[in-house]
Every structure is written in structure tokens, then in C-alpha cells.
Image: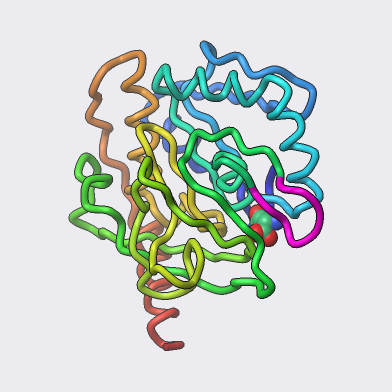
Amino acid sequence: MNIYGDNGNIICLTQRCEWRGIQAKLDQVTIGQKINPDKHDIYFFGGGQDQQQIAVSSDLKETNGILLKKAAHENAVIFSVCGGYQLLGHYYQPEKGKALFGVGLLDVITVAGNKRMIGNIVIEVDKGILSTTNCELSTKMVGFENHSGKTFLGKGVKPLGKVLTGYGNNSNDKTEGAFAGTVFGCYLHGSVLPKNPHFADLLISKALQRRYGQIKLKTLDDTIEWQAHNSAIARTRSRT
Ligand code: GLN
């Protein structure tokens, strides 16, 4: 799935690998195609409207949910945004119809609210997440959210961060996103990774760790990325 520029995250990850001489091979897995848990080190699961989620949820219920779980248990990185995030939880209950099957990789549930949560979002990222990448430049993440689903976290996950501006998981508890092990979910569209190079590099280093152990990534010139990051934060400040 892909909405509000989510596929830009794939371009960002492959480019940040190639700039470092790391070969990044890309496969798209769509409905009816089987995931190969041993082949890929990082998965991106984008957002989508309820209709797309219904189709993808039934595909996951077949066998791809089990295969995705196998990949995660073998420490592949799974990064999901919005609709994809919701389907990595136990279920997503849309406004109409029955609850959609969720893979259960993240201990979260999502229930559609009656109001869409739309706008720029800034979060303070969980301290433990960014420690391995250049978090001295920022401990925040910025993005754009557009969802009606309200996500509630169980004990098996930690929030990706604390909402500073915007709605986050459910516009009540000031949490945003969730993570457990090498599985991450959030509501940040945009695409989120180009404007948050520290988090993009975290995903890359975790994905490499699975086969090559702890690797210190070569530092890139992220001047433009940090300008985009900081101007997005400044924009939200000027609006509050
Ligand atoms: N359909 C889901 C919701 O409205 C997810 C939307 C999205 O992926 N942007 O909450």
C-alpha cells in the first residue's frame, strides 16, 4: 500500500544505501504474491484507505501474515505507516463493517474514530531508539498524518515517541506510533524518512545487523535533509 507519498520512503532507504556503496535490491510484494521471509532484510508497509486495507488484510490472513511474522522473528526490519501500521496490530475496526484481521506483530488495536486526524505532526522519539544514529542533530521526527483510526497500545510495545504537535496514535494519550524488536509503526506520512535521516539510518543499520552484525554507517551529507526537518518543525511552531 502507498498513500500521501509513502513510497518515497523506499526511494530514501535505497538511495541512502547506494550513497554508501551498499547494494539495495527492491522487490514489490502485492496481493496474491508470497513473502519470502529469508530473502528480504527490510520491509516497508505503507498506508491506504479502508478499501485497500480490506483487500490486504484478507491477503495477510491467508499466509503472508505468518510469513511476515517469520521474517520479523528472524530480525528482518518491518517499517509501517498508518494503514500498514494498523494491520500489523491485532485488528483494525473500520467505521463500517467487521474488524479487519491484523498480523499481531505489534501489540496494538485500532478503532476508526468519527473524525479524521489530519495535519503536520512532530514527536519526541523514544530515547532508546535513536542512540545508535546521529541523534545529536535531533531527537524529533516530523511528518504529516491523515487517519480516522485511533490506535491503542498494549504492554507488548513501546510508543515510538511522544506527540509534541499533532494527534498521534489516538489524540488522547499523547503517544505516537509503536515498536517492538525490529518492527516499527507510525502515522507519519510525507514521506517521513527523507526528512528524518536519523530514523532512516536506524532502519538501515538494524536491517544490516541481521546478516552482518553491528555496522557503523558512513556519515552522509544530510544538510538538505536537516533543513527540511528543521523547517517542518519551525512551520508547526509558527502555527501553534
Ligand atoms: N484507513 C485508515 C484510517 O483512516 C488508514 C489511513 C491511511 O493509511 N492514511 O485510519
| Magenta stretch holds residue 137 | no
Whether 177 is drawn above or below 88: the answer is below
Whether 228 is drawn above or below 5: the answer is below
Q: Residue visible at 35% across and 73% down?
A: 164
Spot occupied by residue 110 in the image (x, y as percentages of width and height): 58, 54
| Display colour scheme | rainbow
Q: In which quarter of the image is residue 116?
A: bottom right
Quadrant placement of the C terminus: bottom left
Q: Can residue 185 be seen in this view?
A: yes
Quadrant location, ligand no. 1 = bottom right
Spot occupied by residue 117 in the image (x, y as percentages of width and height): 59, 71
Whether 228 is drawn above or below 214: the answer is below
Q: In which quarter of the image is residue 115?
A: bottom right
Whether 119 is drawn above or below 207: the answer is below
In the displayed structure image, the side of residue 96 where residue 186 appears, left or right: left
Q: Quadrant of residue 147?
A: bottom right
Nearer to me, 167 or 24: 167
Q: What stretch is highlighted in magenta?
A: 92-99
Spot occupied by residue 30 in the image (x, y as percentages of width and height): 74, 29
Nearer to me, 155 or 45: 155
Quadrant placement of the N terminus: top right
Disc count in the image? 0
Q: Residue visible at 38% across and 60% down?
A: 141
| Magenta stretch holds residue 96 | yes
Q: Can residue 4 be seen in this view?
A: no
Which SS type dominates the magenta stretch? Answer: loop
Q: Residue visible at 62% across and 42% down?
A: 87
In the displayed structure image, the side of residue 138 where residue 116 appears, left or right: right
Nearer to me, 130 or 156: 156
Spot occupied by residue 171 in the image (x, y as percentages of width and height): 49, 71
Q: Residue visible at 74% across and 54% down?
A: 49
